[in-house]
Amino acid sequence: MDLDKQKVEIDLLLEALFRLYGYDFRNYAKAHIRRRILHRLEASGLESISLLQHKILYDQDFLNVLLADLSINVTEMFRDPKFFQAVRNLLVPRLETYPFIKIWHAGCATGEEVYSMAIVLKEEGLLESSQLYATDFSSTAIENAKSGIISTDSVKKFTGNYQKSGGKQSFAGYFTARYEYAKLNESLLEKTTFAEHNLANDSVFGEMNMIICRNVLIYFNKKLQDRVIELFYKSLCPGGFLCLGSKENLQFSSLADNFTPLDQAEKIYMKKYQ
Ligand SMILES: C[S@@+](CC[C@H](N)C(=O)[O-])C[C@H]1O[C@@H](n2cnc3c(N)ncnc32)[C@H](O)[C@@H]1O
């Protein structure tokens, strides 16, 4: 395959997605985008990326399939249990001093991360004084997240994560079983607002005490990572916390000096008071 031609075809496809539908993947990591597009090309049996582009222009269902390919919704409850342990041990004592807590989960996928936070806040007696915002650019992911539904198999799978994160209650007790599905107790989601928000082109999202954006920046190039870190900086109160994923950090950012690392291993930072 001619790699130069392929690069042009990918650029044109991304341009079409942006100009026609407003989805801006132009500053995502090239290797990730290429891998996902080639995966869809192979699965579709089409001969070239140009034909794939033609199909997304005229076939809404196919467009949705490609959008799902490009947004990796993989997530878990209590993913990286040590991170949630650090939230309990390091952040909860600080959050307890606030009369009201605003938390933003950016790139929340199908909701498992914000469900986990709601459980931690409930167990620590902070849920009542909290407002959580869970956003993603994928409308399908947000619809799933709102439902509070996961599979019963997942409940079994996530129980170990919950226990490793320091959870001591009955994890299954947070769900009502319905055949092969389990629904998170509604009271846990009463303090969460779900909304579509695109980190590539939407703006600041309120005055937050804590922003959790885990396993999202890895898909972006440096330019888009910079944009998003600036967005988070502007959205955080002084003294607010920024939590990134295990493979992400602030070292690359020109705003790094405006944050104090609180836990280097768990990628937890605090916006400095200036
Ligand atoms: C791998 S998941 C991470 C989910 C969760 N934060 C976690 O760590 O388990 C990445 C999520 O980022 C979302 N995402 C990708 N690009 C985005 C953008 N420009 N704006 C908002 N969300 C985006 C995807 O739709 C996906 O749900």
Image (spheres, rainbow, N blue to C red):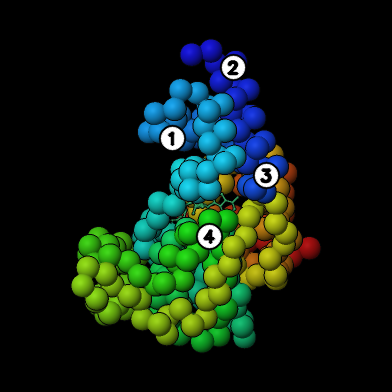
Could you give the CA–CA distance between mark 3 and mark 1, rounded to whole angstroms? 20 Å
Q: Quadrant of residue 234?
A: bottom right
According to the image, label 3 marks what residue? 20
Could you give the CA–CA distance between mark 2 and mark 1, rounded to whole angstroms? 18 Å
Q: Does dot 3 land on a helix, a strand or a loop?
A: helix
| In-front residue for pair 46/123 | 46
According to the image, label 4 marks what residue? 139
Q: Relative to 230, is 147 on the left or the right?
A: left
**Amino acid type indicated by mark 3:** Leu
Circle nearer the N terminus (2, 3): 2
Please say if the residues under marks 2 and 1 sit with CB atoms less than 8 Å apart.
no
Which residue is outermost to the front? 58
Q: Quadrant of residue 235?
A: bottom right
Picture residue at 24% right of the left edge, 76% below the top: 178
According to the image, label 2 marks what residue? 5
Circle nearer the N terminus (1, 4): 1
According to the image, label 1 marks what residue? 40
| In-front residue for pair 91/204 | 204
Circle nearer the N terminus (3, 1): 3
Q: Does dot 1 land on a helix, a strand or a loop?
A: helix
The answer to whether residue 238 is above or below residue 15 is: below
Q: Relative to 142, is 165 on the left or the right?
A: left
Q: Nearer the viewer, mark 3 or mark 1?
A: 3
